[in-house]
Image (spheres, grey):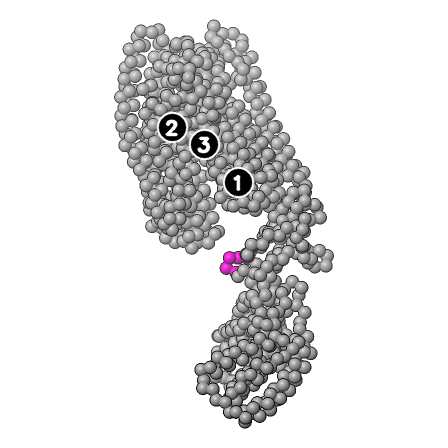
């Protein structure tokens, strides 16, 4: 297995400075990606009547958009590997804008599926992946914090878009609103323009996997502290030996950490979103009125908003950072426990308590979701990794809520839904704990071996600077990347 | 109402006649009673009465009296005919109330459904809502437990919409420590709806508000649509309310409401508790208030929807404003970057020593990027 990825980066990430502007840009991009499909549901009732279709047909617009967003992951990864984050995000912003403008002139429901669903979904995919990737290039020591802050974009943008959409709808009807929303989404281009590619002028490392393709000068000059100010982020590290994997890194499927993450996540996503989707209907089922049920969701969003940066902060501490995978496993298991205990909550107060804990759990997992992937595969391969992960996660994310809905319909009681979701989250949580325990052990072993090898090779080459650098990097951040 | 009263009296009279007929053992006379004209509805009534008589009689031991019966029969028949004639004359003079063009005409052949509503009052006033769909004969019963001092007799009266009903003043006796007032009202049309109150000597009052089922929560914000587009204006009744007979749509103009007829411009789709008005080819004149009316037997309940038609330039203005803002921001950020990188370029371009200096300073100060520069170590 390849050695620790810190040495793979080939430069020292700034961990600050312009990085915070990049985090703000990522905040906006990620916020729009996650919140935009959810906020469009306000218009559905009117559109449903206008086109004279059933509710399920209209709900497909949201589903197609979400599916496109996840399916567009690999495409996005390829483009980011090739061109860097900035152009892709700007193109994505323009795509969503065009989609909304075209949709506002729509004459049939198919028109909406194609415009909002397909084009809009792809545009959002082009926003999500690059935003996540660029954080990895700018931050290393403070990366959990940066990730937590960037992921806070989702609840914040959702809380802003929801009342804004209502206002637009009352003033302009659905057609005008779509037009104006198109221009609002164009702000993603502003976010993209902030995503300046990081300059990599640090001395390079002798890399185990040297790439022959797409010559980035770093790996060729073995050891010379070159003054390369490169524009692209697609470093050699993102490509494994072989030109075939120039576009996307399929060798990730041999990566132990990546496989653990993938398997656990696929199971987890079946039960991740359903409890949130069914919170309000469950409350109404228990006899709570509509406004109080909606208020539960607001409580949930508020707690979520604050817990994400807090989780990032905790993840950054010296205690947690080296073993951040355990933190993630804990978050997932905690989610599962919450859902299993939910049926015990009775009455409105019980549900409020549950909403608070749900917000805590949901926020924790969301903030760490991509941080742990970065931690496992390293910033270079992250772009391909996230593309592969999203397209595979597409299935559970889309199937989860309808399956849970079917459970509710069959049994007529919501508690089975919560039991099922609880199990779907607790099992991966425990799986993560066990697997990562073994993974960490192996990684520590490999680290020791790699250090020994490096020590030996340093005697043979005249790269004293490299040796120093290796020694320095290895000691600064004891992290685990495989 | 007088008409109904008249008819009821007719019915009672005829019942009495047919009852006496039964005693005389003759059913045919009952069936011979026929009224023509406006009282024609009574034919069925009487036939009903007759058939009921026949049914009852078949279980009884027929007892024909023979000749004596025939003589008595003819005498009674004459009396009956005379009575019927009198009633016919008096009934015919009563004007049927002109029902609104929108409510269906009262079906004279069907008997009024009986409905009872009562309330026991303990305080000094109360309002009770009564939801009515079809014309009914409504019996309202008021019971009052009385105040501190309970006089044996108090005067009670009925009023409608604040105005006292004539001849409704009665003296109410105290029975079982309660005062009772009871009155039958015939509710046939929209004008009969309203607020009926029974008043106990001015001290206690129970209001019964009679109304058709009301429309649910109304949308207070206007529906917005665009010139040349089509729009669907919906109206919905709460699921708990009963299904109306039909739906009508009205447009508000200077002189009140004017009914909308389906055609090329308007189409109406009714679906039990929901209705939709589709307006095609919108023009600016189509803006305004629209009313949907759920038609019940006894009245119409109205819902109100406002429509606003705007041109496509309205949302275009904010769109262009935000577009300009985005372009300005993006240009500003990119220009800032260019200017900073130019500074670095000119600074770093002055010799190799500078290169290494910028290198080390670059590492410490964070990223200073150049979008199009490459420097290779010599």
* Mark nearer the N terminus (1 vs 3): 1
Q: Is residue B230 magenta?
A: no
Q: Please give the name of the residue rendered at 50% of the width and 89% of the height, measured from the top-left corner.
A: B64
Spatial CA span between label 1 and label 2: 30 Å
Q: Please give the name of the residue rendered at 59% of the width and 65% of the height, measured from the top-left corner.
A: B297
Which mark's residue is nearer the viewer, 1 or 2?
1
* Between B208 and B27, the one nearer to me in the picture: B27
* Magenta-drawn segment: B237-241
Q: Position of residue A368 (x, y in %)?
A: 39, 33
Label 3: element kind: helix
**Which numbered circle lies on residue A70?**
3
Q: Which residue is mark 2?
A: A373
Spatial CA span between label 1 and label 3: 18 Å
The chain carrying label 3 is A
The answer to whether residue A198 of the structure is visible from this angle is no
**Which image quarter is the C terminus of chain A in?**
top left
Do the residues at discs 2 and 3 belong to one chain?
A: yes
* Mark nearer the N terminus (2 vs 3): 3
Spatial CA span between label 2 and label 3: 16 Å
Q: Which residue is mark 1?
A: A40
Q: Kindly indicate the quadrant of the structure image that contains residue A211.
A: top left
Q: Residue furthest right?
A: B254
The answer to whether residue B101 of the structure is visible from this angle is yes
Label 1: element kind: helix
Position of residue A210 relative to residue B285, above or below, is: above
The chain carrying label 1 is A
Badge 2 crowding class, 10 Å Cα cut-off, few under 14, some 14 to 19, many 20 or more, is many
* Mark nearer the N terminus (1 vs 2): 1
Position of residue B289 relative to residue B348, above or below, is: below
Q: Please give the name of the residue rendered at 54% of the width and 15% of the height, measured from the top-left corner.
A: B372
């Amino acid at each position: 297995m390849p050695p620790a990825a810190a040495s793979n980066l080939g430069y020292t990430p700034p961990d600050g400075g312009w990085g915070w502007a990049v985090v703000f840009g990522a905040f906006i991009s990620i916020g729009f990606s996650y919140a935009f499909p959810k906020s469009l549901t306000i218009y559905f009732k009117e559109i449903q009547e206008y086109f004279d279709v059933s509710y399920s047909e209209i709900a497909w617009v949201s589903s197609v958009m979400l599916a496109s967003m996840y399916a567009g992951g690999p495409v996005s990864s390829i483009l980011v590997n090739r061109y860097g984050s900035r152009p892709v995000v700007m193109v994505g912003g323009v795509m969503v804008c065009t989609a909304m403008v075209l949709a506002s002139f729509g004459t049939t429901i198919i028109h909406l599926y194609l415009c909002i669903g397909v084009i809009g979904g792809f545009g959002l995919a082009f926003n999500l992946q690059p935003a996540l990737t660029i954080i990895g290039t700018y931050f290393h020591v403070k990366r959990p914090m940066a990730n937590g802050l960037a992921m806070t974009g989702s609840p914040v943008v959702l809380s802003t878009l929801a009342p804004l959409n209502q206002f637009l709808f009352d003033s302009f009807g659905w057609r005008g609103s779509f037009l104006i929303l198109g221009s609002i989404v164009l702000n993603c281009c502003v976010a993209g323009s902030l995503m300046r590619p990081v300059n990599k002028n640090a001395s390079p490392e002798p890399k185990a996997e040297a790439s022959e393709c797409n010559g980035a000068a770093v790996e060729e000059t073995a050891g010379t502290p070159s003054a390369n100010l490169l524009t692209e982020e697609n470093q050699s590290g993102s490509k494994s030996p072989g030109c075939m994997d120039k576009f996307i890194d399929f060798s990730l499927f041999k990566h132990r950490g990546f496989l653990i993450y993938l398997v656990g996540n696929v199971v987890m996503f079946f039960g991740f979103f359903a409890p949130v989707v069914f919170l309000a209907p469950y409350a109404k089922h228990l006899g709570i009125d509509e406004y109080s049920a909606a208020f539960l969701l607001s409580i949930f969003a508020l707690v979520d908003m604050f817990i994400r940066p807090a989780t990032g902060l905790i993840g950054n501490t010296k205690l947690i950072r080296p073993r951040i995978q355990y933190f993630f496993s804990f978050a997932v298991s905690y989610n599962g426990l919450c859902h299993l205990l939910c049926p015990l909550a009775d009455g409105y107060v019980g549900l409020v308590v549950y909403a608070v804990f749900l917000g805590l759990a949901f926020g924790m997992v969301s903030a760490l979701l991509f941080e742990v992937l970065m931690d496992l595969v390293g910033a270079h391969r992250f772009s391909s990794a996230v593309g592969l992960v999203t397209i595979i996660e597409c299935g559970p994310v889309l199937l989860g809520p309808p399956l849970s809905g079917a459970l509710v319909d069959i049994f007529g009681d919501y508690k089975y839904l919560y039991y099922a979701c609880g199990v779907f989250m607790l099992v991966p949580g425990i799986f993560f704990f066990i697997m990562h325990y073994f993974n960490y052990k192996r990684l520590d072993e490999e680290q020791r071996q790699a250090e020994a090898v490096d020590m030996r090779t340093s005697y043979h080459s005249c790269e004293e600077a490299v040796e120093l650098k290796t020694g320095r990097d290895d000691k600064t951040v004891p992290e685990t990347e495989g | 109402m007088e008409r109904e009263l008249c008819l009821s009296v007719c019915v009672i009279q005829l019942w009495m006649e047919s009852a006496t007929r039964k005693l005389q053992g003759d059913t045919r006379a009952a069936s011979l009673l026929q009224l023509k004209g406006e009282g024609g509805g009574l034919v069925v009534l009487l036939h009903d009465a007759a058939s009921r008589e026949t049914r009852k009689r078949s279980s009884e031991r027929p007892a024909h009296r023979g000749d004596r019966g025939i003589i008595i029969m003819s005498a009674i028949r004459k009396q009956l005919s005379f009575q019927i004639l009198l009633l016919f004359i008096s009934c015919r003079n009563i004007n049927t109330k002109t029902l609104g063009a929108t409510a269906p005409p009262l079906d004279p052949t069907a008997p009024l459904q009986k409905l009872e509503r009562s309330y026991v009052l303990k305080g000094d006033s109360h309002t009770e809502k009564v939801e009515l769909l079809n014309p009914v004969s409504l019996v309202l019963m008021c019971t009052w437990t009385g105040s501190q001092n309970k006089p044996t007799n108090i005067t009670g009266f009925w009023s409608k919409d604040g105005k006292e009903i004539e001849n409704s003043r009665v003296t109410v006796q105290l029975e079982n420590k309660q005062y009772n007032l009871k009155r039958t009202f015939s509710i046939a049309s929209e004008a009969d709806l309203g607020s009926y109150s029974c008043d106990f000597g001015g001290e206690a009052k129970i209001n019964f508000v009679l109304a058709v089922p009301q429309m649910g929560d109304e949308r207070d914000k206007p529906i917005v649509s665009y010139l040349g587009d089509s729009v669907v204006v919906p109206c919905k009744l709460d699921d708990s309310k009963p299904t109306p007979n039909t739906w009508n749509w009205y447009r508000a103009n200077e002189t009140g409401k004017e009914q909308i007829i389906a055609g090329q411009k308007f189409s109406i789709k009714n679906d039990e508790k929901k209705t939709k008005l589709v307006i095609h080819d919108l023009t600016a004149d189509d803006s305004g208030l629209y009313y949907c009316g759920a038609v019940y037997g006894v009245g119409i309940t109205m819902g109100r929807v406002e429509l606003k038609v705007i041109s496509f330039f309205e949302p275009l203005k904010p769109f262009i404003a935000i577009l300009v803002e985005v372009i300005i921001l993006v240009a500003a950020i990119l220009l800032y970057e260019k200017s900073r990188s130019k500074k670095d370029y000119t600074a770093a371009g002055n010799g190799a020593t500078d290169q290494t200096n910028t290198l080390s300073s670059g590492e410490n100060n964070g990223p200073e990027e150049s979008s199009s520069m490459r420097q290779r170590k010599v």
